Amino acid sequence: METRQEEEKKLRVLKVAIVGDGFVGKTTLLRRYCTGLFQESRVMTIGVDFQTVVINLGGERVKLTVWDIAGQERFAFVRDSFYRGSRAVALAYDASDPKSFYDLPRWRDEVWRVVPTALLLVVATKIDLPRAVPREEAIAFARSLPGPYYETSSLAGIGVERFFFGFARRALEGARLAERREPKADRWP
């Protein structure tokens, strides 16, 4: 029987990031998944926050280090260093705030400037509020990346687990692609 420590060593650790405008609900989404509770966050993330979560993907367990990146412009100067090494990045927007959606191309470009190989996905938050962005438009943007599209409500708990499973699958896909691109270092006998 393996100890918990031995089991942890076998986990594949994958770095991912959630980005988007300030106050779109990135931190609340992450907290909802990690704790199962809705914890409204009115305090902005300063720079970055991160959590680790273990997800079982059909027999393969992965440990995501989820980097919750501050969306306010005043933190732009530190964000680049937090993107490095990300296998997947979720572009988050508030479904009730059109500006947050129309800013997604800027977030995509910022991420790809630092991590051009990161796989992207789009996540709508706050779908329990009146929608200001047509769902079809968001799906079209996600397809253009290309990447999957998810809808969530941290308040109601809708789509949160589905999103994180999709996020983990996307990160694992990104890691496998990176392994094919990056030659393995020569091994000493």
Image (cartoon, rainbow, N blue to C red):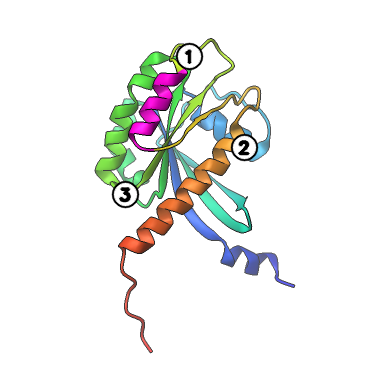
Residue that badge 3 annotates? 117
The part of the image, by quadrant, that contains residue 91 is: top left
For the residue labelled by badge 1, is the local secondary structure a helix, a strand or a loop? loop
Question: Where is residue 77 shown, x and y percent of the image?
Answer: 28, 36
The residue at 63%/58% (across/down) is 59
Residue that badge 1 annotates? 96
The three-letter amino acid code for the residue at tag 3 is Thr
Q: Give the range drawn in magenta.
A: 135-146
Question: Where is residue 160 shown, x and y percent of the image?
Answer: 60, 33
Residue that badge 2 annotates? 161
- Sequence-wise, the earlier of marks 1 and 3 is 1
Q: Main secondary structure of the magenta part?
A: helix
Characterize the local packing of mark 3: few (<14), some (14-19) or many (20 or more) Cα atoms within 10 angstroms.
some
Residue 19: tell me if it is visible: yes
The residue at 28%/36% (across/down) is 110
- In the image, residue 187 sits, relative to residue 63, either above or below, namely below
Going by the image, does 81 lie left or right of 165?
left
- In the image, residue 17 sits, relative to residue 42, either above or below, namely below
